[in-house]
Amino acid sequence: MCLCKCDQVATLSTPLISLPRHPNPSSPTTVNNDLRSSSHTAVIAQIEQCTNIAQLKQVHAQMLRTGIFFDPYYIDYARQVFDQIPHPNLYTWNTLIRAYASSADPVESIFVFLDMLYGCSECPNKYTYPFVIKAASELRALLTGRAVHGMAIKSSLGLDIYILNSLVHFYGTCGDLDLARRVFVKTPKKDVVSWNSVITVFAQGNCPEEALELFKEMEAENVEPNDVTMVGVLSACGQKVDLEFGRWVCLYIARNGITENLTLNNAVLDMYVKCGSVEEAKILFDRMPEKDIVSWTTMLDGYAQSGNYDKAWRIFDAMPSQDIAAWNVLISSYEQSGKPKEALAVFNELQKSKSPIPDGVTLVNTLAACSQLGAIDLDKALEVFNSVESRDVFVWSAMISGFAMHGQGRDALDIFSKMLEAKVNPNAVTFTNLLCACSHAGLVDEGRMFFYQMEPAYGVVPGVKHYACMVDILGRSGNLEEAVELIEKMKIPPTASVWGALLGACGRNGSFELAEKACSHMLELDPRNHGLYVLLSNIYAKTGKWEEVSGLRKLVQDLGIKKERGCSSIEANGSVHEFLVGDNFHPMCKEIYSKLDEIAGRLKLVGYVPNKSHLLHFLEEEDMKDHALILHSEKLAIAFGLISLSPSQPIQVVKNLCVCGDCHTVAKLISKLYGRVILLRDRYRFHHFKDGHCSCNDYW
């Protein structure tokens, strides 16, 4: 900390009535109007009663220790004090820069720094730059921070350890771990803060191996670690899920007499939870002399992620206060464990409580639960989306994804337009979801427009997922030549997903030569992918190349590749029932096959003929082909739904593979013949069947 001299601080002899140079519209305009609480009044009174610099420094130190110096109220007050000083000196400028750097509005720190460059006769010193770099770090402003780094070098302060330590943290926070390490290596006399900074940025940057290697180097250099060091090391252990080393770290802390505190105990607690040792976490939790909301939430997360919801709810109910993070833990754990109804029930409880306010994480997890549940017409998802005014890019992207999965492409595009109106910048995930929406709804021109606008208009460089989506859009619409041209012009090597999108398009359009080309590329990248053999086999069969079909079948057998079996699940009366292809193990097996016979008879009367082109073509006998089609898992699940669910209940089926064309046709006909709503979620999207129609308009 820099120390001031008595003659460096101006005395306050005039009333504070002027406005800040950068006024905050929400802040009061005068000190008298600012005195809204007794605590504020008391502190201001202490300041105004100071008769010398020693007393003022004492109050200042107390405010720093308690953290209230960075309260927006006091920062506004400090700014008004600052504005009364005719010629602020360097210490005064540094104090204000530091205050804003640690505030909720760090960009003001940068503005004050720029004002100082023009308004102060003294040059920035080694105490100025760390505060400005901290502000740039809070803002993730890489270019600004690099500019400040350059200024420090030009000021002959480029090797100051305080500045270098700040830069390590800054570059790490901005995601440039290479630069963070290079700055660390160039630090001439590394202290414990230097090591802590680099270990922490690598641990927080999802590079746990490097973080632990740096810790070993630190030990080799005989630099004594402290509690901050161990927090970073424990974080790395948790990411690696290395419980054994995590236990060693706990012993190391005890052996080396490293002082335990709340932050360190929370780090140990988090390590135990991430490594799956919830009982060890509970032992520590029970003996912790001090607990905060992080401690309680970590323990809650441990039980929830392990599926022990009884204990999770007991922790939740015992929490001194339940902030939004605690609610998010429950919603997220239910959603990730395949319990979307329970996740939505927690969200409903949160809404009823009216406190705390849902945030972006709440909405993303709740929207994901809605997607799992497949709520008809997305009503619940829209209710969740509309329940919060402040929506970040992830919330908007999740809503676009929801519409995309349900084949509501136009609605997805409408949400994107509203997102831009709300001045939320789209990211790579947004465009992946947007292009998927265009693909599922056949919006070729719109997809092409979005793809080619990504980088020039929004600064988002297309990645592999975007190219795969675009190839799919072009391929589905029959624009195979344009799809091939796009692949050839890719700035990054095409992956199996890109060639797979092209191969799928060839299957729909019967392009034999192009299919072989795509398949050869896929074989190089993913030779054991059974799906590509299925697609290629169907293409051979469509073009009458039966020798190639037989050869492909023999190759699959020789390689020992097993096809992923189709599996469909359906919930009825509180229980989930699963069906495999040709399943005959279900307790209601006889009733289900009897229902299938009934369905087959009614379908035949309306002119339905099984579409045998949707088989693998590895079956030769015609009667076996007919039999195989009727045994598809989704047909079994739908038949069970007709038996077990009341006519007013929708039949909701989830399948692990893409629904075949024949099953798609059958589901449409059943929805009309039996007057039922069928919701089928396959590997890629939802299909809503009603009155003989599907929401995808037969485009999937």
Image (spheres, helix red, strand yellow):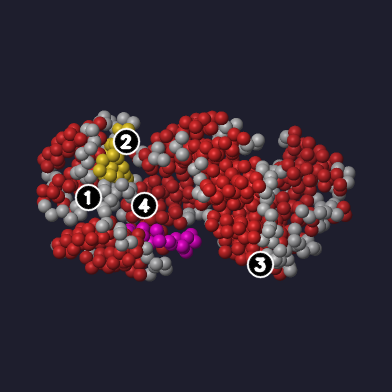
C-beta proximity under 8 Å, tags 2 and 1: no
Residue 425 image offset from top left, x and y in percent = 50, 54
> Where is mark 3, residue-wise?
186
The local secondary structure at tag 4 comes to helix
Magenta stretch, residue numbers: 454-477
Which amino acid type corresponds to the residue marked 4 in the rendered image?
Ala
| Mark 2 or 4, nearer chain start | 4
Placement of 61 over or under 207, stated as above or below: above
Q: Are marks 4 and 3 in contact (CB under 8 Å)?
A: no
Q: Nearer the viewer, residue 236 or 338?
A: 236
Residue 161 on image: x %, y %: 71, 61
Report the residue marked by disc 1. Answer: 661
Mark 4 and mark 1 lie on one chain; the one further toward the N terminus is: 4
Disc 4 vs disc 1: Cβ atoms closer than 8 Å? no
Residue at position x 14%, y 40% from top? 600
Please determine whether, in this image, residue 508 is positioned above or below residue 279: below
User: How far is disc 4 from disc 1 in space, using C-alphas?
Assistant: 20 Å
- Mark toward the start of the polypeptide (4 vs 3): 3
Residue 508 shown left or right of residue 212 in the figure: left
Look at label 2 and name its amino acid.
Answer: Val
Marks 1 and 3 sit apart, C-alpha to C-alpha, by 63 Å
Task: Identify the residue shown where x is 67% and y is 49%.
Answer: 256
Relative placement, left or right, of 352 versus 695 is: right
Amino acid marked by disc 3:
Lys
First of labels 3, 2 by sequence position: 3
Residue topped by disc 4: 437
Secondary structure of residue under mark 2: strand
Q: Which of labels 4 and 1 is toward the front?
A: 1
Q: Amino acid at mark 1?
A: Gly
